[in-house]
């Protein structure tokens, strides 16, 4: 089986070289469309290295992977940046409370 193409929702079409049978395989085993797809996990990696949509597009094009649309990138950006902000605030709060207890 060789990969033929990938859809934006994490579905890959494989084709057998011997018998030409084609079969789809989910990258996300549960196949849930509302969960984070594999491509979407590239967004926080791109952001943490200082990149944005254009850099992710360059990387995915060199890997021959369909790029996320700008709209989809922004959706994941919002989700991850909100999560990071909440985590950072929570950690700063813990550190502040720890410093207060030490005094």
Image (cartoon, rainbow, N blue to C red):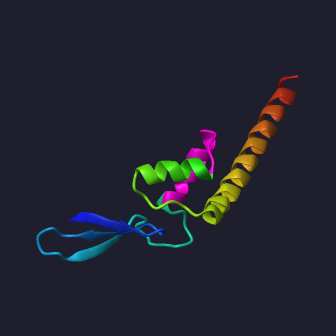
Q: In the rendered image of this protein, does residue 79 appear above or below residue 62?
A: below
Is residue 18 shown left or right of residue 43? left
Percent position (x, y) of residue 58? 51, 49
Q: Nearer the viewer, residue 4 or 38?
A: 4
What residue do we see at 83% from left, 33% from top? Answer: 96
Q: Position of residue 20 (x, y in %)?
A: 17, 75
Q: Residue at x 73, y 54 (%)?
A: 82
- Locate residue 50 relative to residue 37 in the image: left or right: right
Farthest residue to the left: give it. Answer: 18
Residue lying farthest to the top in this orientation: 103
Magenta span has 42? yes
Q: Residue at x 57, y 71 (%)?
A: 34
Q: Position of residue 95 (x, y in %)?
A: 78, 33
Q: Answer with left or right where residue 58 lies relative to residue 26.
A: right
1 to the left or right of 87? left
Read off the magenta span: 39-52
**Image coordinates for residue 28, horizontal then vertical, percent:** 43, 65
Using the image, determine if residue 3 lies above or below residue 86.
below
Please, what is the dominant secondary structure of the magenta stretch?
Answer: helix
């Amino acid at each position: 089986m060789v990969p033929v193409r990938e859809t934006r929702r994490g579905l890959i079409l494989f084709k057998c070289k011997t018998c030409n049978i084609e079969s789809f395989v989910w990258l996300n085993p549960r196949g849930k469309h509302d969960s984070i797809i594999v491509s979407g996990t590239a967004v926080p990696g791109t952001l943490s290295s200082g990149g944005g949509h254009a850099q992710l597009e360059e990387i995915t094009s060199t890997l021959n992977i369909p790029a996320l649309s700008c709209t989809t990138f922004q959706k994941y950006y919002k989700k991850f940046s909100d999560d990071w902000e909440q985590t950072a605030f929570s950690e700063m709060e813990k550190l502040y409370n720890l410093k207060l207890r030490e005094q």
